[in-house]
Structures are given as structure tokens and as C-alpha cells.
Amino acid sequence: MEESLEPEAPEAHGRRAGAMLAEARARAKLDLAEVAARTRIPQRHLAAIEAGDYARLPSRTYAVGFSRTYARLLGLDERAIAEQVRLDLEAGDPQGLPLRPDRFEPGDPARVPSRRLTWFSLLAVLVLLAGAFAFYRTYFSPGLGPAPLTPPTQAAQQRVITSGPGSARPAAAPAGPVVFTSLVDGTWVKFYDATGKRLFEGQMARGQSFTVPAEAQGPQLWTGRPNALAITVAGRAVPMLGNSEVVMRDVPVDAAALLARPAPPAATSPAAPAT
């Protein structure tokens, strides 16, 4: 009888931590199924821990981590249990794993991200960084992009001003002041920029002029009498905005926009007030 007990001494020592957990579970009147439900540890792993059969667990980390969680549920000293599991493993590790300290021992190793998930997360971060760099280069530093393969052609550098059907001629970018002159009394107008800042608002008398500020960004016009406003760009007359009394709002009135507008189908001048 004594001879049969001699070989079992290491195995009994290997079940030391598991025996402590099993006894505590019995005192708490819990079965393995209840412990598994509370700790989220598979029941087969709990049974392996109680039996000291650590070879049935994925690794040393799982053996220590699961034992800590098990001990915490039963109100035992989880650090003492974890240390005892390490001693059990060192005394006779059934897996034959290298004896090295486990620096990362989560309470529930089942929640540790897998290697595949880790690589996927790293790839997702790299994709996000690449997208952020592309967004920055496109919207904040467009000059960082590669230079065009061919220089812009002369036709691309010029604009075409259409003044009537079948007539078109290239012209350089417009320059010079934009001036609106009222042809009749009581022409209500409102000039403002792209942000809504008012540049001028009121009723213009006959012959009264307004020069659009050169520094205005995206100047626009609101009026109900576009046929009562003569327009010049750099001293040259351009077509009116309309040939009848109609409300026009948010009409661009910078030099480029005005020069690009075609003439109204049948331009008419507003009737002068009767005297």
C-alpha cells in the first residue's frame, strides 16, 4: 500500500491548488455548472483545475488566470491561489512547458484578444492612418501631391467669353473694378459676400453707382430690378442681369462671373418715370 502511494506524491502535490478550490466550492454548495456560469470559464477547464490536470488548459497563463478568477468567486486569496498554481506547475508541469514567469495573467484569459484579432486591429489602424494622411494631403496641403505630367496648355489658361450666339473669343482672367449704376430712381439693391456680410443695401437713385470692393470674397447681389442696373467691368460694359423686373437673389457679381454671363435674349431698358 505504501509503495503504491510513493509515485502519486507529485500528482497529489499538483492537485494542491485545485483541491483547495474544490473544497471551497463544496463549502459554498456550488456545482461546476454554477461556477462556470458566474465566471464564464468553461466547465471542463474548471474540472481540469480542480484535478490539477493543467495539460487540458491552453497554457500556463490560462491555468493561473482561471484559478485567480475561480478563487475570487469563492472568496479565497486569489494571489495565494495563483502562487500555488505556479508552484504546482513547477513541481510537475504535465505539459512540459518552459518554466518562466507569467507577466500577463488576466482574470479571464478567454477575453484576451487572439493573435488574428490583434493583426486585424493593427491593419485597421494602418488603414485609418493612411486615410487620414490622404485627407490631409488633399484638403490641407494640396501642394504636397505629385506635379502634373504635362504642363497646362494655353487653352486651359484662357477663358472663353460668349457675347452672343456663334461668337466666342479667348480672354485673359478679368481684372478691374466692378461697378453697378442705377438707370432709374428707387432701385433697391443689396450687395453681400459669401459669408453674408453686407457690403451695401438701400435704394439707388438714377445715376448712382456702387463699386464692388475688390477684396470682397464671393460678392453677391439681391434685387428686384435687374433691368435697372448697368454694369461695367474694368470700364467695359457687360450684359445686364435681366431684361425685366424679377427678384434675383444670391447672384455672383465678381468680375469672372459677370464676364461669363450671356446677354439676356432681348435686353430692354426700364421705362423712365413719367414727368
Image: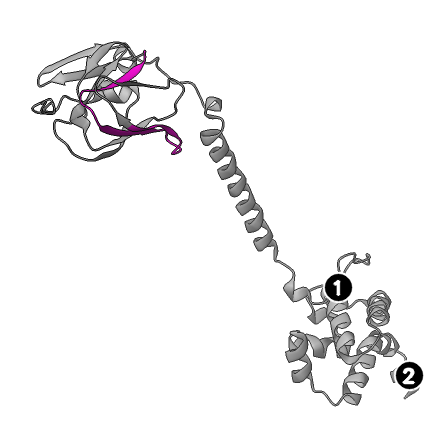
Residue in the picture at 86% in, 75% down: 13
- Between 23 and 168, which is closer to the camera in this rendering? 168
Q: Is residue 86 left or right of residue 29?
A: right
106 in relation to 147, above or below: below
Q: In this view, does 126 lie to the left or right of 234?
A: right
* Residue 125: numbered disc: none
Residue type pointed to by label 1: Arg
Query: How are the colours assigned in the image?
Result: one colour
Within the magenta stretch, is there residue 7? no
Disc 2: which residue = 3
154 in relation to 62, above or below: above
Q: What stretch is highlighted in magenta?
A: 176-202
Residue 188, how many percent across, how many down? 25, 30
Residue in the picture at 17% in, 19% down: 239
Disc 1: which residue = 60
145 in relation to 170, above or below: below
Q: In which quarter of the image is residue 186?
A: top left
